[in-house]
């Protein structure tokens, strides 16, 4: 089990996956990141494919970090929250300068989902390894389960919403069931998860 204080300065990126009930969950979590947090926060939230995302408009007034919709081949900037655009997979890879960059893909849906949480988590785990935190929140399918396993196998920090407190419990319960390489580092209700993120990020004020 990892300690929240010990995570200060140890996480370069946080990947977050949510589905049904996700907007309400993210409203509790994303404002917890302190203004000086040096890492990037990359979010996949399942949305209708045929509608424009309003997530930047919803979250920027609530968050201390900059909030953007991810763009293809954009270098990952610390202190920024990125949302996957509707109907695109969002991945992390390395650009020509070997720095992490974002990539968008229209490959087939995974777990009936595009964007897919698994796709984001697995690609980010390859890039960030032990300096990645993965968070699985409320949702009604199994997306995120294999992705969280990839985060944990890479030595990253695994965080799951307590299924008993989730608006829809299937996704966090599936993530807990899938992780077999040791216990998930944190299984928390949203208020405690927000405290974890606040404690971790407050230690990085510039």
Image (spheres, helix red, strand yellow):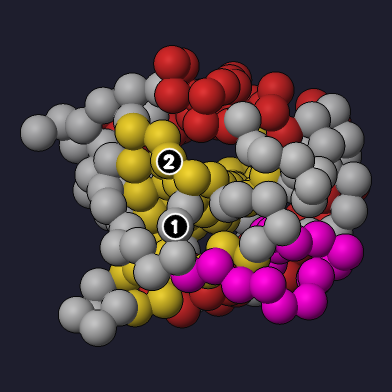
Q: CA distance from mark 1 to mark 2?
A: 9 Å
The segment highlighted magenta reads: 103-118
Q: Is residue 62 above or below residue 146?
A: above
Q: Which mark is residue 68?
A: 2
Secondary structure at badge 1 equals loop
Which residue sits furthest left? 206
- Residue for badge 1: 71
Please provide percent x and percent y for residue 136.
Answer: 67, 48
Main secondary-structure element of the magenta-colored stretch: loop
Residue visible at 69% across and 28% down?
23
Asked if marks 1 and 2 touch (Cβ < 8 Å), the reply is: yes
Compared across the picture, whether 141 is left or right of 44 comes to right
Residue visible at 88% across and 64% down?
112
Q: Quadrant of residue 4?
A: top left
Q: Is residue 6 above or below residue 58?
A: below
Residue visible at 21% across and 32% down?
36
Please provide percent x and percent y for residue 110.
Answer: 80, 71
Q: Is residue 166 above or below residue 24?
A: below
């Amino acid at each position: 089990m990892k300690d929240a204080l010990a995570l200060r300065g140890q996480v370069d990126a946080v990947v977050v996956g949510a589905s049904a009930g996700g907007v309400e969950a993210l409203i509790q979590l994303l404002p917890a990141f302190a203004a000086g947090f040096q890492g990037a926060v990359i979010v996949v939230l399942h949305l209708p494919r045929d509608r424009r995302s309003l997530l930047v408009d919803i979250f920027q007034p609530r968050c201390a970090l900059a909030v953007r919709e991810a763009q293809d081949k954009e270098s990952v900037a610390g202190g920024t929250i990125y949302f996957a655009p509707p109907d695109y997979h969002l991945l992390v890879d390395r650009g020509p300068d070997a720095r992490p960059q974002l990539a968008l893909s229209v490959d087939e849906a995974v777990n009936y989902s595009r964007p897919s949480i698994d796709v984001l988590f697995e690609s980010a785990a390859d890039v960030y390894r032990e300096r990645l935190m993965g968070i699985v929140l409320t949702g009604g399918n199994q997306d995120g389960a294999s992705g969280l396993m990839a985060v944990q196998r890479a030595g990253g920090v695994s965080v799951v919403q307590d299924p008993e407190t989730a608006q829809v419990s299937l996704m966090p319960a599936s993530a807990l069931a899938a992780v077999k390489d040791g216990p998930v580092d944190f299984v928390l209700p949203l208020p405690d998860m927000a405290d974890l993120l606040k404690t971790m990020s407050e230690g990085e004020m510039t």
